[in-house]
Image: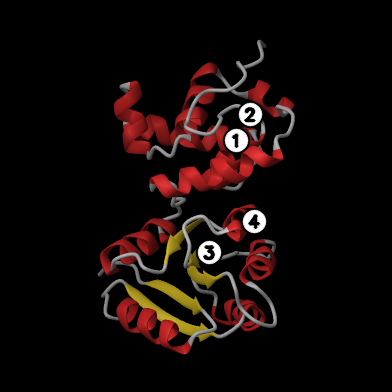
Amino acid sequence: MPEILRLLVADDQAVVRMGFTAMLDSQPDMSVVGTAQDGQQAVRMAREFKPDVVLMDIRMPVLDGIEATRQLSQGEAAPKVLVLTTFDLDDYVYDALRAGASGFLLKDATPEEILAAVRVVGAGEALLAPSVTRRLIAEFASRKRLAVPAELDRLTPREHEVLLHVAAGLTNAEIARTLCLAGQTVKSHVSSMLFKLELRDRVQAVILAYESGLVVAGGATGPARPAG
C-alpha cells in the first residue's frame, strides 16, 4: 500500500474546493482531510488535522494565502504549501514563495499536472521545473537585488555548481545527467548546500541565487563565486 498523502484544500470559491477535493480523493494515495474558505480557517485546520500538503489559494478573505503560508511555515511540523493561482505572472506568487511555499500551480493546469504537482511537493521536493516558475522568480527577484551572502563561501566548487543548476530549475535527475554524477551523489550535494546556506528547501535556494545576482533572468550566471 502506498503512503497516503493527507491534503487540505484552501480556496474561497466553493466550486474550486469541491472540484479539487473530488479529483484528489479519487486517487488511492491521496486523502483530503479538510477544506477551508479563507486563510485563517486554513491555518486553524492545518494545525488541527496536520496535512502533508496544503493547496493554498492566494486571494482569500479574512487572511490571504501569503500570510497563511507564512504562519504555517513558522509552526512545528509545517506542512508543504502548494500555492494555487489564476495567473502565471501573479505579483503575489513571489511573495508566497518567500513566505515558505514549496511551489505554485496554475488553476487551469490539467488534472494530470495537478496530481503530479501534489505528489512532487508531498515527496518533499520543490515544484520548480516548469519554465513559468523560473520566469516568475527571475522577474520578481530581479527587482530585489541583494548583496552576495557570505555563506556562499562555505560551499565547495561542486556544491556551488549544483546550486546554479537548482536555480535554473533542474531536477536532481537532470543535474545528475548534466554533471555525469550518480543521483544519490547529487541528492547529497543538494542537502549539504541547503544545510550550509541555512535554507529550508530548493525554493529558498532559487530565491537566494536570483536575489544575490548569482543567477540572472534567463538562467545566465551572474557574479563569479568568491575565491576561498
Q: Quadrant of the N terminus?
A: bottom left
Number of marks in picture: 4
Q: Which mark is residue 81?
A: 3
| Residue that sits furthest to the top in the current view | 227
Residue at numbered disc 2: 213
Dot 4 and dot 2 residues touching (CB under 8 Å): no
Inter-mark Cα distance, 4 to 2? 18 Å
Could you tell me the amino acid type at mark 3? Answer: Val
Inter-mark Cα distance, 2 to 1? 5 Å
Q: Is residue 157 above or below residue 120?
A: above
- Give the mark nearest the N terminus, 1 or 3: 3
Could you tell me the amino acid type at mark 2? Answer: Gly
Question: Mark 3 or mark 2, which is nearer to you?
Answer: 2
Q: Is residue 167 above or below residue 224?
A: below
Q: Which mark is residue 86?
A: none
Mark 4 burial class by Cα count in 10 Å: few <14, some 14-19, many 20+: some
Could you tell me the amino acid type at mark 1? Answer: Tyr
Residue at numbered disc 1: 210
Dot 2 and dot 1 residues touching (CB under 8 Å): yes
Residue at numbered disc 4: 95
Inter-mark Cα distance, 3 to 2? 26 Å
Mark 1 burial class by Cα count in 10 Å: few <14, some 14-19, many 20+: many
Dot 3 and dot 4 residues touching (CB under 8 Å): no
Q: Is residue 137 above or below residue 158?
A: below
Query: Under tag 2, what secondary structure?
Result: loop
Q: Quadrant of residue 48?
A: bottom right
Question: Mark 1 or mark 3, which is nearer to you?
Answer: 1
Dot 4 and dot 1 residues touching (CB under 8 Å): no
Dot 3 and dot 2 residues touching (CB under 8 Å): no
Query: Under tag 3, what secondary structure?
Result: strand
Q: Could you tell me which residue is drawn at 38 percent across and 48 percent down?
A: 130
